[in-house]
Amino acid sequence: MSWHAEIKFIDGPKFVPSFWLRPSGFAWLLGAGASASAGIPTGYDMITDFKKQLFCQLSGTSRKQVDCNDPLWMERIDLLLESRSALPPPGDPMEYAAAFEAVYPTPEERRAYIDHAVTKGTPSFAHRALAAMITRKSVPCVFTTNFDAMIETATTVTDQLFDASERANLTVAGIDNAARAALCIKESRWPLLAKMHGDYQSVELKNTTEELASQDREMRHVLTNACTRFGLIIVGYSGRDQSVMSALTDALTTPNAYPTGIVWTCRSAKHLLPAVIEFLNAAADAGVSVSVVETQTFDELAADLLDGTELPDVLAAHVLQARPAEVNQMVPIPSGDRRAFPVLQSSAVPIIEMPEVARRIKLNKSITTQEAQMTLKASRKTGIVASVGHELAAFGRDEDLLAAFSDHGAEIAGTIELNIVDESWAMGLVYDALVHAICRTQPILPRLRRSGHVAVFAHGRRDENASVAEQRKNQQSSAQSAYGSALTGRLPNQSGFFFNEGIRIKLDRVVDRWWCAFEPATFVKTPEPMIQTKKRRTEILLSIGLESGGHGAITMCGQRSFQHGFR
């Protein structure tokens, strides 16, 4: 899904000046991610816990045996749940609600789980910062889908630092007393904290698919009304529950909705759900100023905002008491020639020159990048392609590209500029080309995947003749000599488990230049699982202690009328 051209993408420090021009012009919406640094499980943490419990129930495995921090365990869990159709697929917006209801089928059990989870938390640096802004009357109202009491607890403390006449006296309303929130909106009684899914002490909580779909009508109306009076800053919220997203969308139908704009904060815009992108595009179409602020955590955003203002000394001292500990610390440099894994490894070679343009090919109909890649593969022509609507950006011979896409009315249309910093399709095109360039003159094969590109040493094929086998072995001899053992084969004592040595490859920009970073890895293919409805191969990454080098230059060029390359 593409973004509306009017939407701005900025970082936290760039957002600070515009916020402090009119801080009381924004309402806030906080999701589970806003309470992560307070020690309260996020939605993802809870999904992982529910999956673990379901896996143990279905497989008979002891919970103490399962380590959810291990990607291999999570892959095994997802594979079993997929085979039993126990849950929606990973990443589905309904995954959390379905998993919660599957493990805890009654409202009483779900309420007890939430009650136990929220007692683990202590207001974080960001909660203290937000409370300080509430006390100083810079934040009129806050909406949250969280059950915890971090905001009201933090604000009670900041209020007590001042005389009674200077306190904010935050009003808290949940779904079981939504009329209180409605009255605050009607009579402009600020500040207000509205808990969209209930408080952990509430009789009713919104967790399951049915519960989330039937969000309290009055509380939804309160949120919609607030969005017609204020702009909205969204922090730590995924946009998974349709009820809240519908309320945000309904506000767009009113005149002058979100008067100071919408600010959606996230770690990376490319990870936002389609429902969020659709909402932000609709807001931009309605003339609302929309910004996506990329910031790693709520704590980081709060620190940026506090840099833009002066708090009273007593508030500043209170907030800074919860400042996260310094991450960067002096450590002794390890001595000796070698250490056992795990170790910190940083292997990369600089890319001296990046492609700036690609061939532009016009088509008579729009196709996706995946469809274009499949079409090129089926034609047995060589090239790299990415879809840009009714056009393709491509590397390769013109005649090969025209032949491959002849059924799509392909026409050469000059070149297209590659802005790999801001355009994801351009980054993907260059990324694919880089991996092919690395493999072009080396005895390794590319494997291009969404989860990351890799290059592996190839097994010999069953029909491989003696001369081809000898040539392959000669090409791999230097690497095998450096490694000291086989580059491909079967794992010892694991019948059917084939392995390939290889590297993970990443295109990265650090200190104002591009790098090709690589990580040695062993890739293992397990036998096909005994599941008739699904056929799937799983790759397991085994950590290994390899010392790896790299070539100082990588070159990849097309021929004849168009060329592309890395240096």
Image (spheres, rainbow, N blue to C red):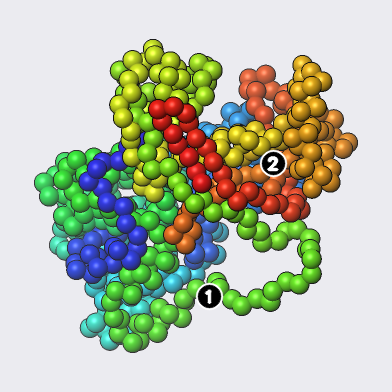
Q: Residue at x 36, y 69 (%)?
A: 304
Image coordinates for residue 380, horizontal then vertical, percent: 54, 17
Label 2, secondary structure: give it. strand
Frontmost of labels 2 and 1 is 2
Instruction: Specify whether 324 is left or right of 288.
Output: right
Instruction: Specify whether 362 is left or right of 351.
Output: left
Image coordinates for residue 28, horizontal then vertical, percent: 30, 59
Q: Are marks 2 and 1 in contact (CB under 8 Å)?
A: no
Image coordinates for residue 509, horizontal then vertical, percent: 47, 54
Q: Residue at x 79, y 69 (%)?
A: 336
Viewer-closest of 172 and 442 = 442
Q: Which mark is residue 191?
A: none
Local crowd size for mark 1, using a 10 Å CA cut-off: few (<14), some (14–19), many (≥20) = few
The N terminus, quarter of image:
top left
Type of amino acid under label 2: Gly
**Residue hosting label 2:** 502
Q: Which mark is residue 326?
A: 1
Type of amino acid under label 1: Glu
Viewer-closest of 72 and 243 = 72
State the CA–CA distance, disc 2 to disc 1.
36 Å
Instruction: Specify whether 417 is left or right of 497.
Output: left
Q: Residue at x 50, y 73 (%)?
A: 324
